[in-house]
Amino acid sequence: MIADADLVRTGLSRSVRKSEMAAGRGCDVGSLIRMDAVRAERAVRDLLEALGEDPDREGLRDTPSRVVRMYGELLAGLETDPAEHLSRTFDEPYDEIVLLRDIEFSSLCEHHLLPFMGRAHLAYLPNDRVVGLSKLARTVEAFARRPQVQERMTAQIADALMEHLNAKGVLAIVESEHLCMKVRGVNQPNSHMVTSAVRGVFKTDPAARVEALALINKPR
Ligand SMILES: [Zn+2]
């Protein structure tokens, strides 16, 4: 995983504004991603050459800059602190499960730099503080838009909800399709990966866990 410190060390010769990029699915995750765009463009050009391509032919001429803008978008979560979203909680004496399911995301497998995409389902049991549902979606986006592995992403989301909402329990389930499984290697185009992270009361109380899972699996 690329730490912020590594990005800073690359020299920041140019910044790519998030606003220059396509808005994705409408989740604005951070306004600016810092990267050494000149160096990144050179690397893409070098890669094309190393692969036996002519980076100056018409179709490839703008590819390095396009690829760099794309990574700026795919990795925008590196500039986002999920605590910002999750710290805006409000008092609500509601002590039943809150669930947001089918939160769509796309992430980048850090082993192959190929996307994996799917849906996250987040359930939490509040501790007198609740958070706006959009903040849950933004939290998923913030952790997805980084070089990731799905297992870590699922755990990071659950831990962030536990920590910043002071929740009594969190159940996070992520299901996704990995392009690195679909188009290469074992070539399993129909495989899905499912990960879960269970925290607090959902870990200690089987009945609470069953209730949360039933809500997640309720027919759409
Ligand atoms: Zn992969």
Image: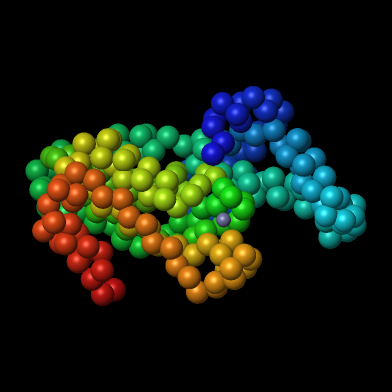
Q: Residue placed at 11% from the left, 58% from the top?
A: 207
In percent of width and height, residue 5 lies at 56, 26
Instruction: Answer with left or right where residue 39 lies relative to residue 187.
Output: right
Does residue 8 appear anywhere in the picture? Answer: yes
Q: How many marks?
A: 0
Residue depicted at 77% across the width and 42% down the height: 43
The answer to whether residue 21 is visible is: no
Where does residue 20 sit, x and y in percent of width and height? 63, 45
Give residue 73's position: percent from left, percent from top: 58, 47
Camera-side residue of 125 and 181: 181
Quadrant of ligand 1: it is bottom right
Along the horizontal axis of the image, is 127 left or right of 59?
A: left
11 horizontally vs 195: left or right:
right
Q: Report whether 129 appears left or right of 12.
A: left
Residue at the spot 60% in from the left edge and 56% down from the top edge: 114
- Residue at the location (52% across, 44% down)? 146
Residue at the outermost front position? 186
Q: Is residue 167 above or below residue 173?
A: above
The C terminus sits in image quarter: bottom left
Q: Nearer the viewer, residue 23 or 150?
A: 150
Look at the image and tell me in which quarter the N terminus lies.
Answer: top right
Quadrant location of residue 130? top left
Is residue 82 depicted above or below 62 in this figure? above
Its colouring scheme is: rainbow
Q: Position of residue 213 (x, y in %)?
A: 22, 62
